[in-house]
Image (tube, rainbow, N blue to C red):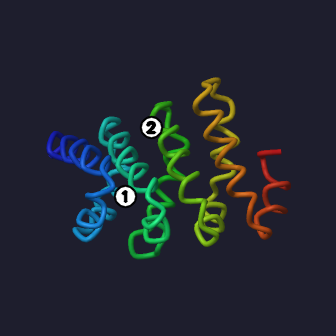
Amino acid sequence: DLQCRRFASLALGNLCASADNHEALLGADILTSLSSSLDVEDLETRFNSCYALNKLAMNHDNILRMGEDACDVIPPLVRLIGDQDTPARTQAISTLRRLALEQQNRVSIIACGALKGLADACTVEELETEREIAACMCSLALSGENKVVIVKSEMM
């Protein structure tokens, strides 16, 4: 039900705001639920799910786990970069920026096609989005194997 999912994602976002809750929440396998909620039609659900993931990604201990295949949140976050809603798009870019602090996630983010989405998002004239794009690109460029791909991409 739309309302249940919307309010559940809002509640998870509020719970994820406290790092003390992260271990218990991740143990309850919320990554799968949040990841699938990034693709729903409802804008509030997408935003709140992305917000929750962004809060989880603020804790460095969670970053590798979030990029693992079993709960991979990277592909839906990359898709969300193309969202027409600026706040949801900015949350997705911010989350990817945090995930890109780990080498294996950087490669996955590029492999999922984030560069095209980030280049398209550059056309949005919104300061916070522009800053998140710049910071995300800085993190992605830390990996040697990404540098050539970035230079040959739409980002240039």
Asked if the residue under mark 2 is in contact with the one under mark 1, i.e. CB atoms within 8 Å, the reply is no
Q: In this view, does 134 lie above or below 98?
A: above
- Amino acid of disc 1: Ser
- Mark 1, Cα crowd under 10 Å, few <14 / some 14-19 / many 20+, is many
Residue found at x 36% / y 43%: 46
Report x, y in % for residue 109: 60, 61
Q: Name the residue under label 1.
A: 35
In the displayed structure image, the side of residue 37 where residue 151 appears, left or right:
right
Report x, y in % for residue 54: 43, 49
* Mark 1: secondary structure: helix
- The quadrant of the image that shows the C terminus is top right
Q: Is residue 56 above or below residue 69?
A: above
Report x, y in % for residue 99: 54, 59
Is 46 or 56 nearer to us in this picture? 56
In the displayed structure image, the side of residue 67 where residue 5 appears, left or right:
left
* Mark 2: secondary structure: helix
Report x, y in % for residue 67: 49, 68
Residue found at x 18% / y 41%: 7
Residue found at x 39% / y 49%: 55
Q: Name the residue under label 2.
A: 88
Q: How far apart are marks 1 and 2 (CA)?
A: 14 Å
Q: Earlier in the sequence, mark 1 or mark 2?
A: 1
- Mark 2, Cα crowd under 10 Å, few <14 / some 14-19 / many 20+, is many
- Amino acid of disc 2: Ala
Residue found at x 58% / y 51%: 97
Q: How many labels does the image show?
A: 2
